[in-house]
């Protein structure tokens, strides 16, 4: 059973388009992290959100944690080919361990 | 090196053989995690260490899987009598503080295990 569901699973868009990736659960998380992973490498942390309703911006990336701390979204504005990769959300459950979503594979075409 | 290193980078083995995967965390990091990732999928938690002890082994898929950490540093993940379903990328991560906090996990490049 997947504790965190990500959607969409795959996304192929043109450079310059906007996109949103969703991470949903029926469980409450202490915090939630977003990672980006490129082929042959480990995931790299992009952001950690802790407070319900929190919004964080990282250049063209905007991350939001749901008010109830059960869901999160990642919005990318004016996507670039360098944004291509696997995006993973990970929720900290019971201050104990991280559960990862199944990932969203993003391809940005020049 | 400054980052988390894992060895070997690739391992091909025959069904039924034992394999040992190694992780060298960032120096001074007290928490160490093992995950498993199937092709292009999310990460499946296996086990984490706080120092040399493993408070949570609940993610280990079966008793064929074991892990240890010595000296609060290097960790090895051992899979006995490998099965084809064990084929995956095994990722190790370390973090500075207490496991299970919002400390940043730094991941190694992984070991790709293929069981024929």
Image (cartoon, rainbow, N blue to C red):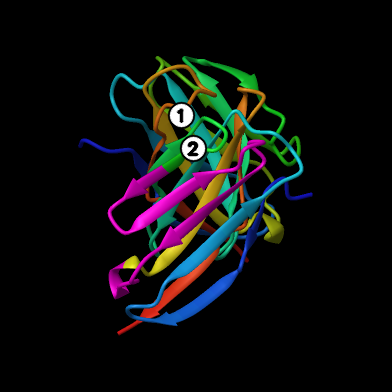
Q: Secondary structure at mark 2?
A: loop
**Horizontal and vertical percent for residue B84?**
69, 61
Seen in the picture, residue A31 relative to B19 is either above or below; the reply is: above
Seen in the picture, residue A13 relative to B60 is either above or below; the reply is: below
Q: Chain of mark 2?
A: A
**Figure quadrant of residue A15:** bottom left
**Is residue A62 one of those drawn in magenta?**
yes
Q: Nearer the viewer, residue B103 or B79?
A: B103
Residues in magenta? A56-82
Seen in the picture, residue B85 relative to B46 is either above or below; the reply is: below
Q: CA distance from mark 2 to mark 1?
A: 36 Å
For the N terminus of chain B, the image quarter is top left
From where the camera sits, is residue A17 visible? yes
Q: Nearer the viewer, residue A14 or B114?
A: A14
For the C terminus of chain B, the image quarter is bottom right
Q: Secondary structure at mark 1?
A: strand
Q: Determine the residue positioned at 57% across, 33% down.
A: A52
Q: In the rendered structure, find residue A8 and report the number of the disc placed on it.
A: none
**Is residue B62 one of those drawn in magenta?**
no
Seen in the picture, residue A109 relative to A75 is either above or below; the reply is: below
Q: Which residue is mark 2?
A: A54
Q: Determine the residue positioned at 52% across, 41% down.
A: B20
Q: Determine the residue positioned at 41% across, 35% down.
A: B105
Q: Chain of mark 1?
A: B
Q: Nearer the viewer, residue A94 or B72?
A: A94
**Figure quadrant of residue B35:** top right
Name the side, left or right, on which B43 lies relative to B69: right
Q: Determine the residue positioned at 47% across, 27% down.
A: B102
* Residue farthest toward the left in the current orientation of the protein: B1
Mark 2 or 1: in front is 2
Q: Nearer the viewer, residue A98 or B1?
A: A98
Q: Which residue is mark 1?
A: B75
């Amino acid at each position: 059973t997947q504790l965190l569901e990500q959607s969409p699973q795959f996304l192929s868009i043109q450079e310059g388009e906007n996109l949103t990736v969703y991470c949903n659960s029926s469980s409450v998380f202490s915090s939630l992290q977003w990672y980006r992973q490129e082929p042959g490498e480990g995931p790299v942390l992009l952001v950690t959100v802790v407070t319900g309703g929190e919004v964080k911006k990282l250049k063209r990336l905007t991350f939001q944690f749901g008010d109830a701390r059960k869901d999160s979204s990642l919005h990318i504005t004016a996507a670039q080919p360098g944004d291509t990769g696997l995006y993973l959300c990970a929720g900290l459950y019971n201050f104990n361990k991280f559960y990862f979503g199944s990932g969203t594979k993003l391809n940005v075409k020049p | 090196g400054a980052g988390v290193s894992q060895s070997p980078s690739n391992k091909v083995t025959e069904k039924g053989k034992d394999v040992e995967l190694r992780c060298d965390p960032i120096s001074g990091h007290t928490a160490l995690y093992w995950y498993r990732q199937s092709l292009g999928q999310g990460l499946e938690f296996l086990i984490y260490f706080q120092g040399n002890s493993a408070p949570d082994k609940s993610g280990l898929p079966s008793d064929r899987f074991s892990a240890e950490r010595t000296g609060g540093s290097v960790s090895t993940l051992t899979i006995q009598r490998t099965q084809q379903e064990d084929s995956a990328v095994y990722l190790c991560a370390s973090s500075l503080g207490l496991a299970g906090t919002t400390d940043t996990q730094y991941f190694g490049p992984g070991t790709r295990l293929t069981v024929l």
